[in-house]
Amino acid sequence: MKIVSWNINSVRLRIEQVVRFLQEQQPDALCLQELKCPDEHFPHEAFEAAGYTHRHNHGMKGYNGVAIVSRLPFIETDIKHFCGKEDRRHCMTKFENGVELHNFYIPAGGDEPDVTINEKFAHKLSFLDEMTAWWADRRISDPDRKAVLVGDFNIAPSENDVWSHKKLLKVISHTPIEVEMLEAFRKSGDFVDSVREIVEEPEKLFSWWSYRSRDWRESNKGRRLDHVWATPNMAGTVRSASVYDLARDWEKPSDHAPVIVEFNM
């Protein structure tokens, strides 16, 4: 089962790139974040023509939004709102093999890592808190649940997930409190970092590069903000994992590259 996570930064603007990727890589399920597209304008026809006949989209005008498109049928779909906001940051599907696929778009958090002056950062930390409590409850209710959690987590947890640990310690996405809270969420499900099962540390690995760099590949000042995690009962099933950074070279690219993980089911 080949699963991909990709912050597309406007699905309508980049639908040709998405279709190209689907044709080249043929994933079973593609999870998109930052759709910037209300549900009534989601490009269903393009996905249908590409063979992705099963879709669960949860979007809104202007920003945010998540979707799962698949060649495999769903037996269940759901969404979860966090922090009392209906800002389209989660959707879930369940497949016939019993695996849940959760797609998240965790808030970026703004520019200043101080909750007293930055509401966006406070929202991000509250979101992580709620995610942690929510999954802990789900784990209690069904300890044998099989799930894959993917998305733009907007946090690069390891020193090897950023181009400079020292320079980014006070930059949102790599601050100690974010890393600590993401680890608390990971522990709430004892999740396995599927990508790092294959691309082991200390190898550097990034999935996002700023638009500000004229030559992003030469400067390589990236961060690994996009993740694919799995419940512990799926440990050892990862067949391959990679970041498809070629898409970052395409015309008018997203600043994120697709993260691809293939599981043996």
Image (cartoon, rainbow, N blue to C red):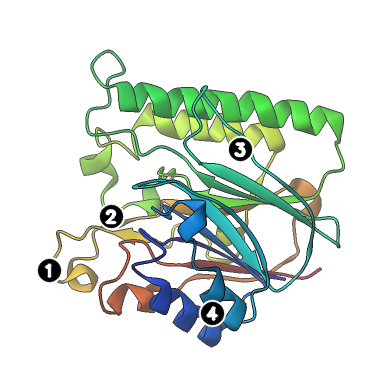
> Is 222 on the left-hand or right-hand side of 6?
left
Residue 178, picture quadrant: top left
Give the quadrant of the N terminus.
bottom right
- Dot in front, 2 or 1: 1
Assess disc 2: are there few (<14), some (14-19) or many (≥20) residues with their C-alpha within 10 Å of its C-alpha. some
Residue contact at pointers 4 and 3, CB within 8 angstroms = no
Q: Which residue is mark 4?
A: 22
Q: Which residue is mark 1?
A: 214
Q: Mark 1 is on which residue type? A: Arg
Q: Seen from this angle, which residue lies furthest front?
A: 40
Report, in whole angstroms, how far the alpha carbon at label 2 lies from the one at label 1.
16 Å
Q: Mark 3 is on which residue type? A: Arg
Residue contact at pointers 2 and 4, CB within 8 angstroms = no
Q: State the SS at label 4.
A: helix
Q: Is residue 178 above or below residue 216?
A: above
Asked if residue 26 can be seen in this view, the reply is no
Q: Which residue is mark 3?
A: 186
Q: Position of residue 166 (x, y in %)?
A: 24, 41
Q: Position of residue 77 (x, y in %)?
A: 73, 49
Between 176 and 40, the one lying in front of the other is 40
Residue at 32% from the left image edge and 72% from the top image edge:
248
Q: State the SS at label 1.
A: loop
Report, in whole angstroms, how far the alpha carbon at label 1 lies from the one at label 3.
35 Å
Residue at 70% from the left image edge and 39% from the top image edge:
190
Give the quadrant of the C terminus.
bottom right
Residue at 55% from the left image edge and 75% from the top image edge:
45
Q: Earlier in the sequence, mark 1 or mark 3?
A: 3
